[in-house]
Amino acid sequence: MIASFIGALVFVILGAGLIIYPRYVDVDISPIILSITGLISILFFGLVAITLFRKLFDKKAGLIINKQGIIDNAGGTSAGTIAWDNIIEIKISKVMSQKFLMIIVNNPQDYIDMETNIIKKQAMKLNYTNYGSPITIASNTLKINFDNLNSLLQQKLKEHKENKTVGI
């Protein structure tokens, strides 16, 4: 998480450099395009840096898995409580080199509507449009590696579905 935080800060600094010194960048691109790219870099990676900084000092568990479902406090667009009954499936998605678990739910709009932060709400809408779910979980802010997290959640979802079928 610290490495990701430092990486995000580097991109904020590079974005600022594109805005302040677009003439000194040795590429055949308009200074206006470079400035817009710099602004996007500052906004996106600035949000990432702020989220990671807050997570570094957050004492709450990143993810709680219980009989009712998953309580997500893992990242910037944490969904809160995700009931097992709402989860259709859990898929792996990859953006650049970062893997995410996409929690496909039967009521995605409800999770988007519950979010009160406008930036997080927009990020959830974007996730839903691009990946089929507003709920994503990455393991880079958790004390578990991605493959183990995926296996654990897949197993718990399978157990829930089997118990529901049996009538337990």
Image (cartoon, rainbow, N blue to C red):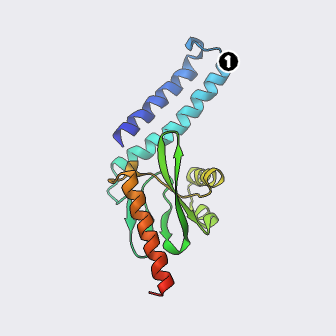
Residue 37: x and y in percent read 61, 28
What is the three-letter code of the residue carrying label 1?
Ser
Secondary structure, mark 1, is loop
Query: Measuring 61% from the left and 24% from the top, which residue is drawn there?
Result: 35
Residue 157 or residue 141, whichever sits in front:
157
Q: In which quarter of the image is the N terminus?
A: top left
Answer above or below: position of 97 versus 167: above
Callout 1: 10 Å neighbours few (<14), some, many (20+)?
Answer: few
Residue 108: x and y in percent read 61, 64
Based on the displayed image, in which of its 4 quarters is residue 70 positioned?
bottom left
Query: Measuring 42% from the left and 58% from the top, which residue is drawn there?
Result: 150
Answer above or below: position of 120 versus 166: above
Residue 15 or residue 156, whichever sits in front:
156
Query: Measuring 54% from the left and 65% from the top, which residue is drawn there?
Result: 89
Residue assigned mark 1: 30
Answer above or below: position of 5 versus 21: below
Query: Measuring 59% from the left and 58% from the top, which residue is drawn there?
Result: 133
Residue 94: x and y in percent read 52, 46
